[in-house]
Structures are given as C-alpha cells and as structure tokens.
Amino acid sequence: MSVDLNTSIKLAKSYLATRRMNYVRTFDGYPPRMVLADLARFCRANASTFHADEAVRNQLVGRREVWLRIQQHIRLNDQELWQLFAEGDG
C-alpha cells in the first residue's frame, strides 16, 4: 500500500507536533524547571564547550547537543520545529 507524499508529510508533522507537546509537558512546572537548571549547568548551555583535550571537548559538545534538542522542542512552535526537521536538523 503506497502512501502519497502529502499524507506522509501530514503524518510526519503530526508526529513532530506530538513529540514537541510531550517535551513541553515533561518540562513544564516547578520541578521540571529545577531539572532544566541542572541540565543547563551539566550540558554547558551558557558556557563554552572548548577544552584542550579533544575527548573532553567532544563529550561537552555532545551534552550541549542534548540541551539544544530539549530547548528546540520546548521553545519553538510546531512550524519552526517542522522547518528544522525539513532541513534535516530535527
């Protein structure tokens, strides 16, 4: 059974919107804000990921990627998130 392109796009957008809503629900409220504050420090949300040791630097960059993904899903609207997804970054 083939699915046309428009149906595939609608399904992908629906999936992405649901995923975004799950992130928002997970990180909404006081306890989740405390978790986000901890993750911000751990993932170097507001600090450089540079380190002289390449292995350490790669680890810090990986942590930061996780932080950025969480932020994308809780701060961007569905259309903005879809644009990232369409560009291959979502």
Image (cartoon, grey):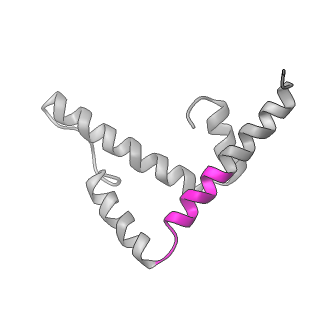
Q: Position of residue 57 (x, y in %)?
A: 22, 35
Task: Give how far across and how far down residue 68 sits, in percent.
Answer: 45, 47
**Residue 69 image position (x, y, % from top left):** 48, 46
Name the side, left or right, on which 59 lies relative to 81: left
Chief SS of the magenta region: helix
- Camera-side residue: 56 or 25? 25
Q: Which residues are magenta?
A: 18-29
Q: Which residue is at a point 56% across and 52% down the rendered structure image?
A: 73
Q: Tell me which residue sits at (73%, 42%) in the image.
A: 13
Residue at image position (34%, 58%) is 40
Name which quarter of the figure residue 25 lies in: bottom right
Residue 59 among those drawn in magenta: no
Viewer-side residue, 64 vs 48:
64
Instruction: Locate the N terminus and report the quarter of the image it occupies.
Output: top right
Give left or right: position of 61 versus 26. Answer: left
The C terminus sits in image quarter = top right
Where on the picture, by quarter, is residue 46?
bottom left
